[in-house]
Image: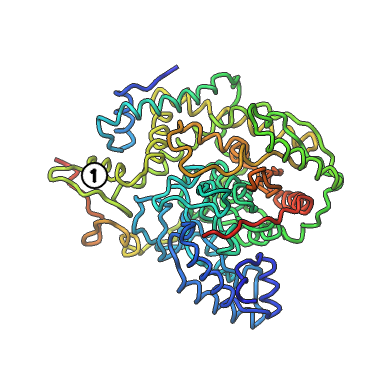
């Protein structure tokens, strides 16, 4: 029994712990040995077995006393973007090399208060900028799924989180999503990932990329697990002024699987030119499944969809350029070695040239340009106006009675690592085409594994919900998950 | 509309406080131009009368009483500094 404990879902493990079938220490050891044998995936980049063992023992004591919140004793991985006290938190960047925060992010603090066990920190794209986990200072995270000798990307930016959950190295993981960074890697690895409504989870202690778009969420094996873990991550935080002071409903209790009478919108603008037939077929399947489950399918229009990606690639770099100004070699992280006579500007410029990778440098400079005098109105303000129109498209659909929107999660299944190396940066950005609208409009969105393509790789469908209605969104996702019956797992090669 | 030449790339890099060596400027200029031309699709959109979005959720920012809530953490604040001396962050000479 103890050999396969790492393969359990959060719900199964929670129930098993409460029924005293095994202990959190046993569960944690199973994950730690799975991690030890999975170096080839490069998912965990900082290992914290001592913390994990201490937290597991404490959790077992709580469970024995009958004081066990849902996450108590459940081993998880934490994306490197989250500040964890005394543990390296680098955002996968060399500029934060050696940085050990003196504080704990609100989300991880909440999870640990509830007894969750941290196994370590997970690989990601540098500062969450990327769609393939290839911009990480730790090297690529690798998808446990493969079809031949070539290694595939687990997606990005939460690539390590996706790889670790899909490979059963941990029961679940935290992710963050600025333009699709939870949902795209979830789709590429056959797991579930939800980006909550902007403001549902505190951003305090999560290294900032684009503050008006960033939102953390869970990456899990099932929709039920997503409900359980989101419960522990969500909630108002006075330390984040954009965190919503709203009650958090009991998400798991809302999973009835009953979607009868719900109106599911199918946006025609998401049928992109050149979309692979398999993605379209998956989408049609999803439509049929929700229809069979009793939902009303309605064609809708979100006319500004096409402009979401260019708007995002103005707004996100602009915010990143401001947020990343703090990495100056003074307060934390890397400082370049200076030549004699170098002044403070040399220190800034050399430090940032050495510390930031090329994609981060590029985005900071794009952001600097669109915010600079003379271009602010032409680029940045125009993009913010277009963003208002993108949100209005969704508002109008919801006002017309649409409860949820079904789209593909990604334009393809996982691609080969290195394949996009020489591509134009804009080509990589196209990965976010179906997900980025959701961030711009601040809506909750979830990726649910829904099938395998002809190569045998997982593909995901995305559901988008009304603001603050993650419970209903999770329930629709639950119905879709049940209908799709996706149970495939990657064959172990690592 | 606009393409970025080598001089503009140099200027942007300096504004961003990122050292870019002279031989790398043409490639950077080319990449930035590509990204900007992608953004220029936004010019097709009629944004007349539309306010730039500042907040995605229509909520009032919370206020709190203007009192000190934290402090006296000099050691923790300096702990991760690459160069901290005598309770201060140390940097190269700023004023000539």
Report which residue position mark 1 lands on.
A347
Label 1: which secondary element: helix
The percent position of residue B63, horizontal first and vertical second, equals: 54, 50
Whether residue A242 is visible, yes or no, is: no
The residue depicted at 35 percent of the width and 30 percent of the height is B28
- Residue toward you, A100 or B54: A100
Local crowd at mark 1 within 10 Å, few (<14), some, or many (≥20)? many
Which residue occupies 79% across, 34% down?
A: A400
Q: Is residue A479 left or right of residue A313?
A: right
Q: Residue at x 51, y 70 (%)?
A: A32
Q: Position of residue A432 (x, y in %)?
A: 57, 38
Q: Can see residue A81?
A: yes
Q: In front: A452, or A434?
A: A452
Image side of residue B16 versus residue A219, left or right = left
Q: Is residue B61 left or right of residue A254?
A: left
**Quadrant of residue B22 in the image?**
top left
Residue A121 vertical placement versus A14 (above, below): above
Return the x and y of residue A217 as percentages of the image width and height: 59, 53
In depth, the one of A412 and A223 nearer the eye is A412
Viewer-closest of B72 and A351: A351
Locate residue A298, reporting x and y percent.
81, 34
């Amino acid at each position: 029994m103890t050999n396969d404990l790492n393969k359990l879902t959060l719900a199964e493990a929670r129930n098993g712990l409460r029924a005293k079938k095994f202990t959190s220490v046993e569960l944690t050891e199973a994950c730690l040995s799975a991690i030890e044998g999975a170096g080839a995936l490069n998912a965990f980049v900082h290992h914290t077995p001592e913390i994990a063992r201490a937290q597991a023992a404490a959790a077992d004591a709580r469970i024995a006393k009958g004081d066990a919140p849902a996450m108590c004793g459940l081993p998880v991985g934490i994306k490197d973007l989250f500040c964890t006290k005394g543990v390296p938190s680098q955002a996968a960047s060399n500029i934060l090399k050696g940085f050990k925060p003196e504080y704990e992010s609100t989300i991880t603090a909440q999870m640990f208060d509830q007894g969750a066990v941290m196994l370590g920190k997970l690989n990601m794209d540098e500062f969450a900028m990327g769609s393939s986990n290839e911009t990480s200072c730790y090297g690529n995270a690798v998808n446990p799924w493969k079809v031949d000798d070539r290694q595939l990307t687990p997606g990005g930016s939460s690539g390590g989180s996706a790889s670790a959950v899909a490979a059963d190295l941990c029961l679940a993981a935290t992710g963050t999503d600025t333009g699709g960074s939870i949902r795209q890697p979830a789709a590429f690895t056959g797991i579930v990932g939800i980006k909550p409504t902007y403001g549902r989870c505190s951003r305090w202690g999560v290294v900032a990329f684009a503050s008006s778009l960033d939102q953390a969420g869970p990456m899990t094996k099932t929709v039920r697990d997503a409900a359980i873990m989101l419960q522990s991550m969500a909630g108002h935080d006075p330390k984040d002024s954009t965190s919503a002071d709203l009650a958090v409903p009991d998400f798991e209790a809302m999973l009835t699987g009953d979607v009868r009478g719900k109106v599911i919108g199918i946006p025609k603008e998401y049928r992109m030119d050149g979309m692979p037939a398999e993605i379209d077929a998956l989408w049609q399947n999803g439509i049929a499944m929700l229809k069979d489950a009793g939902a009303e399918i309605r064609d809708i229009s979100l006319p500004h969809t096409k402009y979401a990606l260019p708007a995002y690639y103005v707004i996100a770099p602009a915010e990143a350029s401001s947020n990343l100004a703090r990495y100056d070699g003074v307060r934390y992280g890397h400082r370049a070695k200076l030549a004699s006579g170098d002044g403070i500007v040399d220190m800034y410029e050399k430090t940032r040239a050495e510390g930031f990778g090329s994609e981060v440098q590029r985005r900071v400079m794009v952001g600097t340009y669109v915010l600079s005098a003379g271009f602010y109105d032409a680029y940045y303000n125009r993009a913010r106006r277009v963003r208002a129109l993108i949100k209005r498209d969704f508002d109008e659909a919801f006002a017309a009675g649409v409860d949820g929107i079904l789209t593909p999660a990604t334009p393809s299944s996982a691609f080969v690592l290195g394949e996009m190396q020489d591509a134009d940066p804009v080509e990589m950005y196209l990965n976010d085409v179906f997900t980025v609208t959701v961030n711009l409009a601040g809506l909750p969105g979830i990726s649910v594994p829904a099938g395998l393509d002809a190569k045998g790789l997982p593909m995901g469908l995305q559901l988008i919900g009304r603001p603050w209605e993650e419970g209903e969104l999770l329930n629709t996702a639950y119905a879709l998950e049940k209908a799709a019956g996706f149970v495939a797992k990657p064959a172990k090669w690592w | 509309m606009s393409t970025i030449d080598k001089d503009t790339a140099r200027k942007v890099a300096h504004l961003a406080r990122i050292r870019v060596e002279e031989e790398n400027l043409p490639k950077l200029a080319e990449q930035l131009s590509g990204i900007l031309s992608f953004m220029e699709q936004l010019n097709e959109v009629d944004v007349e009368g539309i306010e730039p979005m500042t907040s995605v959720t229509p909520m009032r920012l919370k206020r709190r009483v203007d009192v000190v809530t934290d402090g006296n953490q000099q050691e923790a604040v300096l702990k991760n500094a690459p160069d901290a001396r005598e309770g201060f962050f140390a940097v190269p000479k700023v004023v000539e």
